[in-house]
Image (cartoon, helix red, strand yellow):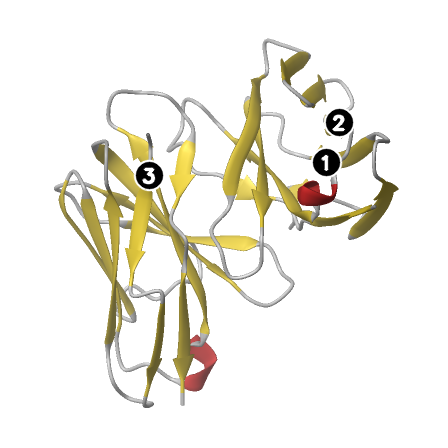
Amino acid sequence: DQQVKQNSPSLSVQEGRISILNCDYTNSMFDYFLWYKKYPAEGPTFLISISSIKDKNEDGRFTVFLNKSAKHLSLHIVPSQPGDSAVYFCAASERGGTYKYIFGTGTRLKVLA
Amino acid sequence: GAVVSQHPSWVICKSGTSVKIECRSLDFQATTMFWYRQFPKQSLMLMATSNEGSKATYEQGVEKDKFLINHASLTLSTLTVTSAHPEDSSFYICSARQASGGETQYFGPGTRLLVL
């Protein structure tokens, strides 16, 4: 049972435009969410996180939105740059638990110059 | 800050041998480390949670005797793949959570294991 899903395996965006990556989850106990960027044969790099008490968190070009009622979060990257091309994973965890993460299936973003 | 290293970065071994992978937090102490594996074009699957000074907690379906985890200090966890077989070939990634608090996990660069 996939508790965290990223339904778009890939996304192509023109440089300078907005990239929107989506993530859905099923477990209502999740209360902390993160986005990681990953290149092949490397470990994930932390981008941004959000706690369930918020609905938006912004850090530079990256903004994460959380819709708890829809169990949905999204990552907005604006403006998109060719260096943003990578696989993006969302992850969810329960703070009161073991802090383990459940990762989504990933979305490959390609930013076209 | 929050740098995690893994060693080796890649390893090729013969079937039946054991392989040890080290995960170190370089500039912080980590009470909890996590071990993941990733197959090509798939997600990161949590294998086990490693707590300093206590036994690791394994996820369902992960063989404890196959994947031995030791977390002997606040900066080092090791994963030993015992009697490796070709199906164990994968990309193994560790992460660490700071002992000082915070929920973010910082990931190592990963270790690619190829069992012939």
Specify the amino acid type for callout 1.
Cys
In what element is the residue under mark 2?
A: strand
Quadrant in which the C terminus of chain B appears: bottom left
Outermost residue toward the top?
A53
Residue B111 sits above or below residue A90 on the image: below
Q: Which residue carries the number 2 mark?
A: A76
The three-letter amino acid code for the residue at tag 2 is His
| Circle 1 SS class | strand
Q: Residue at x 17, y 40 (%)?
A: B52
Gap between marks 2 and 1 measured at Cα = 12 Å
Q: Is residue A72 above or below residue A90?
A: above
Q: Nearer the viewer, mark 1 or mark 3?
A: 3
Q: Are both tags, 1 and 3, on one chain? A: no
- Disc 3 designates what residue? B3
Q: Are marks 2 and 1 on the same chain?
A: yes
- For mark 2, name the chain: A
Viewer-proximal residue among B54 and A49? A49
Figure quadrant of residue A67: top right
Query: Label 3 sits on what residue type?
Result: Val
- Look at the image and tell me in which quarter the N terminus of chain B lies: top left
Residue B29 position in % (x across, y down): 20, 32
Relative placement, left or right, of A108 versus A8 is left
Residue A80, percent from left and from top: 77, 34
A54 or A77, nearer to the observer: A77
Q: Would residue A33 be seen by someone viewing this image from the given angle?
A: no
Alpha carbon separation for disc pair 1 and 3: 27 Å
Residue drawn 72% across and 36% down? A23
